[in-house]
Image (cartoon, rainbow, N blue to C red):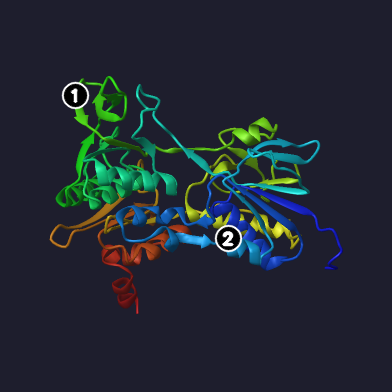
């Protein structure tokens, strides 16, 4: 492209993993097509949010989780406004304005505002010492609390809550996990696997209150200087110098809604990741595609590839939702779940329990096919089971050996 050619302006709202992955894919396809500007809420380059847990646990430093340093933006001729989020979009004029007053025109706009943590709106939720677990600042707040305080309460027993609890325990705090359902990680695990996980974590020193309904966060009065306890609906309470809320997230769509873009639970996009305004695209946790919203990395990477191809004018790709499997390592315990692992009418389970080795496997079968799987402790065959689920492979010939894994099934078949 001629140096004097005025390039169209692409502005990206959101400097997180989804937006920057889209930009990386775009640079592979059409490195010189756009003049790119990025606005981010945090005062950093782009980092791997998934690795905040090892930073909290003391296994990594913040520098270790950076994906794109400020030098990367400069090398790729991208203007970065870090710590200066966009506060308004004027679609008719194709302009936007940031919190610090930067005004910009755009030819194409990519919204990648992600999600916001859901803070339980109970009395006391605004007290000092009550935080989410979402960004580098949250981790720094937790590390500071661990240096100066003793009692931590994590509200939410999903993956994020357990990672926060483990990290705080590793930093020397007494940690209690409070969870409203009666089993941990109910979206990824069935009850037996969740109970095995709970036992393993209790053996490491974590405490759990399941089926517990948080009613109020308390502080000394006066001076209201910090949270001191969590009170439950039944009137009981436990001490808390730090309360970490990990009770879910909500798509961050306020900016898009104010701009008049069509939103339901999230920003509505079509198969090209385009919003109802053809100049505006959206990717990641802030989007809703065919009624679904997204939190896992794999579908968001697929969205980034499709969106980048359209921005690059590189052919007509479509985003197609794929079945996803969840492979997790929670505080050193390997877990894997895929498909319909709860089961129901017309399904049957085959189960392997080996308490001595700490292994549990449950496969859900329907009509001679695997439709779901939960693995605890030994997850090596997880991708193979997932492949059987996706391909709807008949399993009659290997049913007796299915729980023992791919190697034995394929050896017998040979």
Left or right of residue 380: residue 10: right
Residue 236 got which mark? 1
Whole-Å distance between the Cαs marked 2 and 1?
A: 49 Å
Residue 202 image point, x, y percent: 17, 47
- Residue 114, compared with residue 390, is above or below; it is above
- Residue 249, compared with residue 107, is above or below; it is above
Residue that mark 2 sits on: 70
* On-image quarter of the N terminus: bottom right
- Along the line of sight, the residue nearer the viewer: 413 or 92: 92
**Mark 1 crowdedness (10 Å alpha carbons): few <14, some 14-19, many ≥20:** few
> Outermost residue, bottom direction?
414
Residue 253 in view, yes or no:
yes
Location of residue 263 (image quadrant) = top right
Residue 109 image point, x, y percent: 71, 47
Dot 1: element: loop
Residue beneath the point at 18% across and 59% down? 358
Residue 281 got which mark? none
For marks 2 and 1, the one nearer the N-term is 2
- Along the line of sight, the residue nearer the viewer: 92 or 211: 92
Dot 2: element: helix
Left or right of residue 401: residue 255: right
Residue beneath the point at 69% across and 60% down? 309
Answer whether labels 2 and 1 touch (C-beta < 8 Å). no
Residue 212 image point, x, y percent: 25, 30
Location of residue 124 (image quadrant) = top left
Left or right of residue 45: residue 341: left
Left or right of residue 110: residue 205: left
Residue 393 in view, yes or no:
no
């Amino acid at each position: 492209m001629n140096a004097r050619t005025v390039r169209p302006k692409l502005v990206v709202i959101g400097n997180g993993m989804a937006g920057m992955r889209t930009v990386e894919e775009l640079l592979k396809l059409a490195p010189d097509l756009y003049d790119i500007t990025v606005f981010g809420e945090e005062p950093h380059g782009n980092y791997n949010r998934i690795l905040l847990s090892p930073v909290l646990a003391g296994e990594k430093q913040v520098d270790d989780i950076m994906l794109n340093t400020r030098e990367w933006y400069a090398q790729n001729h991208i203007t970065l406004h870090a710590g200066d989020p966009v506060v308004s979009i004027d679609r008719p004029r194709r302009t936007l304005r940031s919190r610090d007053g930067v005004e910009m025109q755009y030819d194409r706009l990519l919204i990648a505002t992600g999600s916001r943590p859901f803070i339980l709106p109970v009395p006391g939720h605004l007290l000092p010492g009550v935080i989410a677990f979402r960004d580098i600042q949250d981790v720094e707040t937790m590390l500071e609390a661990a240096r100066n305080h003793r009692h931590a309460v994590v509200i939410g027993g999903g993956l994020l809550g357990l990672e926060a609890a483990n990290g705080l325990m590793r930093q020397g705090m007494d940690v209690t996990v409070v969870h409203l359902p009666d089993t941990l990680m109910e979206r990824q695990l069935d009850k037996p696997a969740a109970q095995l996980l709970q036992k393993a974590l209790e053996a490491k020193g974590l405490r759990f209150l399941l089926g517990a309904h948080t009613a109020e966060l308390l502080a000394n009065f006066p001076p209201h200087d910090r949270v001191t306890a969590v009170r439950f609906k039944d009137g009981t309470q436990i001490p808390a110098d730090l309360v970490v809320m990990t009770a879910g997230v909500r798509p961050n769509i306020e900016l898009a809604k104010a701009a008049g873009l069509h939103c339901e639970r999230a920003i509505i996009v079509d198969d090209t990741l385009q919003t109802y305004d053809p100049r505006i695209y959206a990717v990641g946790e802030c989007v809703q595609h065919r009624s679904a919203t997204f939190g896992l990395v794999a579908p968001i990477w697929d969205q980034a590839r499709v969106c980048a191809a359209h921005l690059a004018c590189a052919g007509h790709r479509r985003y197609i939702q794929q079945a996803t499997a969840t492979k997790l390592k929670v505080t050193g315990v390997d877990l894997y779940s895929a498909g319909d692992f709860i089961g129901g009418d017309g399904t049957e389970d085959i189960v392997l329990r080996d308490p001595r080795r700490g292994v549990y496997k449950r496969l859900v079968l329907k009509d001679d096919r695997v439709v779901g799987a939960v693995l605890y402790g030994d997850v090596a065959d997880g991708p193979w089971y997932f492949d059987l689920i996706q391909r709807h492979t008949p399993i009659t010939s290997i049913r007796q050996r299915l729980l023992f894994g791919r190697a034995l099934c394929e050896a017998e078949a040979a």
